[in-house]
């Protein structure tokens, strides 16, 4: 008999045997940004999360920073009237996110500002890139990889010029990291901006609440291609979750293309991918300079909130346990809608769990 219970017989003993901890430095807080002033719109499927105008965002981020979280990820949400087939509002000069970055950086210079790079929040059809007739199915449309790349690069350039520290391409176009990196490297003003690849991003139903928040669900028609059928989902570009090792190949490609951070997304149902990616690319490997990131997505957030609201789970404890699990699998940074709550509760959370 091995007396494992000796390792758990007091709080001090358990603390000594803990391999993993959670720090406010690990957390990245996502925000949805809208046009206007003094706007704050609750997202029904994400209790506690709101779309914020830039002035409200700055106030909110100030509170976040005071609570100890120094990294934010920004998503732009534009009104339907500002969307078009090419997602022009994503990369127009002085676009919404560029203005948000400038406002945040001037109010909170110490805040690391990361911006999401994707067209789906800005296209009238809701897809992450430009459309073209499908090669494999007559009368259907598909998302064109190569013509989308310069638009993503231009979007990244505008955010970097505004002062973004990191740009995070999430469109799942092949070569997106290389295209963005090359564009940023052209100008001394943008060359220090880093790229965080949404490298292993799966076509997941857990993004449902996000699409409510961002108004980015794929639509059903395209004005430029009347009569053509629009792809109903993102399965031709986001990964099939029945693959086991392709996520590692996607991560390897992003590292090769110059990503400084690589991501697995969603987090909780994909901890196997995260753990294997960490073994292959994490600390102690040749790619140790690249940081591993996991995104606990909107559906994971909504699921835990819903169970807690029903009294079926203890909110504080499941938040903490889920984030520890993601760290244990190897994430060095976690994007989570719980970031602010965790920081505000950090003393109670620890005290509570002891
Ligand atoms: C944009 C994007 C999405 C998410 C992050 N970036 C939505 C999608 O791919 O449909 C999802 C994040 C979340 O669910 O919290 N492409």
Image (cartoon, grey):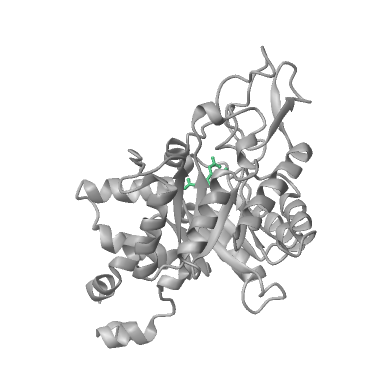
Q: Residue at x 66, y 56 (%)?
A: 161
In the rendered image, the residue lying farthest to the top is: 227
In the rendered image, the residue lying farthest to the left is: 311
Q: Could you say where residue 77 lies in the image, as x and y percent from the top left?
A: 49, 39
**Quarter of the image where the C terminus is located:** bottom left
Compared across the picture, whether 144 is left or right of 33 comes to right
Compared across the picture, whether 241 is left or right of 151 comes to left
**Quarter of the image where the N terminus is located:** bottom left
Image quarter of residue 280:
bottom right
Q: Nearer the viewer, residue 250 or 89?
A: 89
For the question of whether residue 235 can be seen, the reply is: no
Q: Residue at x 27, y 70 (%)?
A: 349
Q: Could you say where residue 103 lies in the image, as x and y percent from the top left?
A: 49, 56
Q: Could you say where residue 337 lies in the image, as x and y percent from the top left?
A: 40, 54
For the question of whether residue 189 can be seen, the reply is: yes
Q: Residue at x 70, y 61 (%)?
A: 190
Compared across the picture, whether 317 is left or right of 98 comes to left
Q: Classify 127 as above or below 181.
A: above
Q: Could you say where residue 19 lies in the image, as x and y percent from the top left?
A: 44, 80
Q: Classify 285 as above or below 100.
A: below
Q: Nearer the viewer, residue 31 or 45?
A: 31
Q: Residue at x 45, y 68 (%)?
A: 70
């Amino acid at each position: 008999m091995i007396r494992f219970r000796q390792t758990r017989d007091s709080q001090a003993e358990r603390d000594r045997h803990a391999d993993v901890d959670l720090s406010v430095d690990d957390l990245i807080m996502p925000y949805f940004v809208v046009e206007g002033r003094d706007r704050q719109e609750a997202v029904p499927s994400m209790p506690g999360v709101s779309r914020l105008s830039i002035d409200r965002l700055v106030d909110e981020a100030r509170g976040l920073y005071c609570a100890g979280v120094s990294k934010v990820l920004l998503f732009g949400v534009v009104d339907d009237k500002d969307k078009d087939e090419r997602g022009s509002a994503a990369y127009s000069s002085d676009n919404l996110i560029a203005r948000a970055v400038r406002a945040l950086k001037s109010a909170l210079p110490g805040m690391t500002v990361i911006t999401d790079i994707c067209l789906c929040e800005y296209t009238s059809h809701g897809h992450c890139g430009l459309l073209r007739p499908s090669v494999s199915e007559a009368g259907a449309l598909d998302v064109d990889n190569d013509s989308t790349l310069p638009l993503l690069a231009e979007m990244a350039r505008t955010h970097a010029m505004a002062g973004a520290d990191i740009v995070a391409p999430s469109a799942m176009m092949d070569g997106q990291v290389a295209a963005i990196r090359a564009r940023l490297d052209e100008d001394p003003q943008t060359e220090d901006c880093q790229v965080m690849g949404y490298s292993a991003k799966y076509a997941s139903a857990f993004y449902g609440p996000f699409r409510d928040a961002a108004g980015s669900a794929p639509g059903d028609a395209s004005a430029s291609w009347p009569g053509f059928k629009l792809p109903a989902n993102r399965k031709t570009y986001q990964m099939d979750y029945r693959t086991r090792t392709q996520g590692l190949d996607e991560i390897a490609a992003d590292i090769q293309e110059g990503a400084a951070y690589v991501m697995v997304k969603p987090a909780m149902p994909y901890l196997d991918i995260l753990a294997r990616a960490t073994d292959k690319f994490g600390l102690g490997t040749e790619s140790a300079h690249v940081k591993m990131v996991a995104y606990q997505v909107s559906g994971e957030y909504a699921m835990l909130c819903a169970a807690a609201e029903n009294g079926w789970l203890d909110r504080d404890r499941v938040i903490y346990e889920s984030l520890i699990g993601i760290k244990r699998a190897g994430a060095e940074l976690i994007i989570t809608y719980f970031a602010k709550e965790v920081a505000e509760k950090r003393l109670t959370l620890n005290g509570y769990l002891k």
